[in-house]
Image (spheres, rainbow, N blue to C red):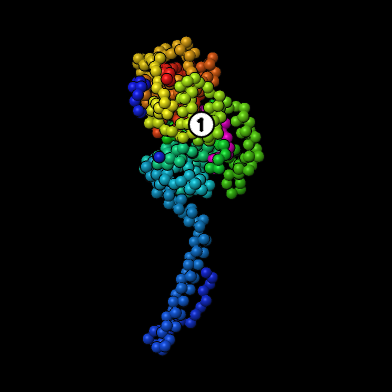
Amino acid sequence: MTEKPESQNKEPADAKKEEPALPEQSAPADKTAEATTVNDQAETEALACTRKEMAELLASKDQEQDRENVKNYINTLEGVEKVEDLRTLSLEQLFKLEEKYEGVLFYAFTDFMDGGAKLDFPRWQESYKSPREGDKFQINFLGNQAAYNELGAGDILPPSIRQITVWEKGDSNRARTSDRRIGLKGKNDGSVNGFFDTKGYISIFTGDVMIIGAPQKEFDEKYRTADGKLDYTKYNADESGKDTEFIKTKLEKGAITKKQPSSEEIDDLMKGIEAEGKGQKVVDAVTAALKEGMRGDHCWDWVNKVYKKAGAQNQRIYQDLSYPGKDCGDRHASESLMSKLRPGDWLYINNKNKYDENGCHSGIFLGWINEDRQIARMASCPGAGKKGHVTRENLKQKPVTYISKPF
């Protein structure tokens, strides 16, 4: 990652029948007004009957029409570009469709469909329920910012899938494999659900790839009612205690449990991080940026925005980006320099990503989780247009190639 200049600035009742009036030309002259009134009344009552019949007809067709509407949505899609018809819906609309036609979210936000293929509605749900171990699906939230911010793999994948591996931006070097799936399936009710490892919730964003673990069909069948609907009550009776135990005992301190953490969760996450001088200003700015959902054009841009929010500048104390390719090898900060890291420091870590020419990623050091093993907590932006988040980083596996201090 080429260093940027320090100062650079980088989404009716039944109608009563009346005798028909005589044609106007046959009516006596003194009866014209009366005939007109009767005609008007008959027309109004007939219209009321028509409206009532129409309402009853529509009511009787609601379920059939619902199905037909979804069928029309799905069967007209051709490849990824046509999925925008579903992506434009609100989360509330999407979850209502998902409740009736399980699998809508899977078809809307993965690359399951080939470019020119049409989805065959009768086989649609069966295909969603039958992924195979090792299947890869790329995520695409284009055009739906709410889905991008809030939907997770636990909302999209069927209950039979209890383990996944996620490659961030499709990069196998940036992989996380889940230890447990919390919940039966997401239903937009604010409850904790999704795929977790010991670091916490595994988010998915556009460009990420999900790799399916071995499906557990018996699990899926166990938690369905006779009509095939998901049985959340039975799941909670059997599994909610295990879910709670996992969250309490397996997750690292301060681990995120949702894609979009609450203000209180962010406070808990940042609690106890203490720094000195401008470093504390940077830490406070990180907290504010996380709560605001501040985005970056890229990782460097997000860190730069945090520094500006803190009213801080950065002074470089170490840099080595002279190695060839994306692997820094032995060209990284010494043990002595690492021991002097403080919350608020700006780091480049060599995660060998395919986007930066030096394979580096910008972030803000928040402190040690385990200094002996060089496990650090950092804040950064995971990619273009994304909100900042807090991560756990192994700085032995992803060595530091740049350090600057706030002032």
Q: Is 81 located above or below residue 250 in the figure? A: below
Q: What segment is highlighted magenta in the picture? A: 175-187
Q: Is residue 232 visible?
A: yes
Residue 178 drawn at (x, y percent): 53, 29
Tell me: 382 left or right of 238: left
Which residue is nearer to you in this view: 243 or 378? 378
Image spot of residue 323 (x, y percent): 36, 15
Query: Label 1: few (<14), some or many (≥20) within 10 Å?
Result: many
- Which residue is under mark 1? 202
Residue drawn at point x = 56 percent, y = 24 percent: 272
Q: Position of residue 174 (x, y in %)?
A: 45, 25
Horizontal and vertical percent for residue 263?
A: 53, 34
Residue type pointed to by label 1: Ile
**Is residue 263 or residue 382 the one in the foreground?**
263
Question: Can residue 112 be seen here?
Answer: no
In magenta segment, residue 162 = no
- Please tell me which residue is depicted at 44% across the width and 46% down the height of the picture: 89
Q: Residue at x 51, y 31 (%)?
A: 202
Q: Please, is residue 349 above or below residue 151 in the view? A: above
The answer to if 177 sits in the magenta stretch is yes
Residue in the picture at 46% in, 40% down: 147
